[in-house]
Amino acid sequence: MNGASSKESQRRSGGSNRDKSYAYALIAVVILGVAALGITLRDTSDAPLDVPDAPLGGAEAPAAFEDSVSSPAPAQGQAIPADAPRVFSLTGRPDAKGKLWWNGIPKEMEEGTVEPSGSSNIAMKDYVGAESCKECHPGNHESWSQHPHRWMNALATDEIVMGDFSEGAFIEYLGGRATFYMEGGRRRMKLERDDVVRIFDINRTIGSRFTQYYVGKLLEGPETQSHVLRKLEHVLPFGWWIDKEEWIPVVHVGEELPDGQRNDPFARPDEFYYDGRCSACHTTKPIGDWMMGVGGLNRFEKSSPHPVSFDVSAYLKENHAKNLPERLFEAPDSNQDFLRVMSAIERLPTVEHTANLG
């Protein structure tokens, strides 16, 4: 998330303040967006949550997150009112850098905070795209367009794909064979060992500098029709080594171990879905969506210079009313409920819900 990917972050300003709203890095988006989010400079109003740190970029919540949402204590024997504010953070500490609030941010927290500006630069509708930056910043646009980070994630078009998908392209690995080919104008990756065959459809690429990996879904294989490999786009097990011009097993995705100890893609492919994990760093998401993902919120927790309180219930109703099931708009009663909402945001198709894939 460096300056190379930030040229997407110019926000709408009625067409008259383009220079002023142009952001040069994603952290600048955070700083520019504090008025919309409401930075908390002094906050001791909510009790700590007794929960461990969340796993980085994971969609599945551990059981330890269950039943520990912090909200004002009700009278003895009474349930927490449905409209009472609730708060979630990854650390559960009063000094957490990123706090997600439901049912609004409490009035008592408004003292010592930056007053909201009335405008937004954190939602998908606020982003105008790279081409709109080109008119006033042609040099920056040209530099960004040629930078590898611009193509960190892209649709797998003829202009972008570097791997060899010609007839006869293959790799043998762990007693299995992977072949790479074209079918009906689409790129395929086929894994075979013994009697087990899996065929993946390729939709996107990752990287363009040293290696290029591929993202797609399972088309054929022993997994059921409802299996996650068929439903969510994930990182496929083999990539293209650009300098050597050869196929290799992917690295830097799972735990780095010697061959024979790593995950065997012919036995069980990794379910490392791109949109919910990799995209926290490698795509330019709207900052509101980014903060609502475990991966984004974790990075915000580590990198933000100030604590931020974010009214996520209002944000969801305004920006994702048609994208999420109605039950996810009900007030959460536990951290597990919060994490279900975050997981749903992470699983939104990145191609449709991002300011820029790179």
Image: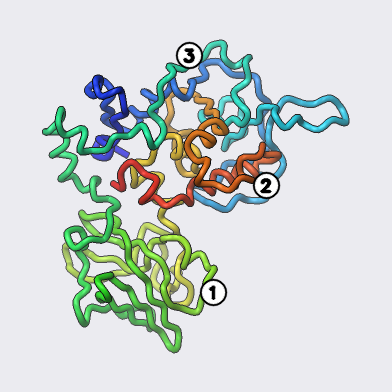
When asked about the image quadrant of residue 283, the answer is top left
Element carrying mark 1: loop
Tell me the amino acid under the disc marked 2: Ala
Element carrying mark 3: loop
Label placed on residue 64: 2
Q: Quadrant of the N terminus?
A: top left
Where is residue 229 drawn, in percent x and y? 47, 66
Element carrying mark 2: helix
Q: Are marks 2 and 3 in contact (CB under 8 Å)?
A: no
Identity of the residue drawn at 61% across and 45% down:
326
**4 or 354, which is in the foreground?**
354
Give the side of residue 313 with respect to residue 76, left or right.
left
Q: CA distance from mark 1 to mark 3?
A: 51 Å
Can you identify the residue that label 3 sits on?
115
Identity of the residue drawn at 43% across and 28% down:
304
Tell me the amino acid under the disc marked 3: Glu
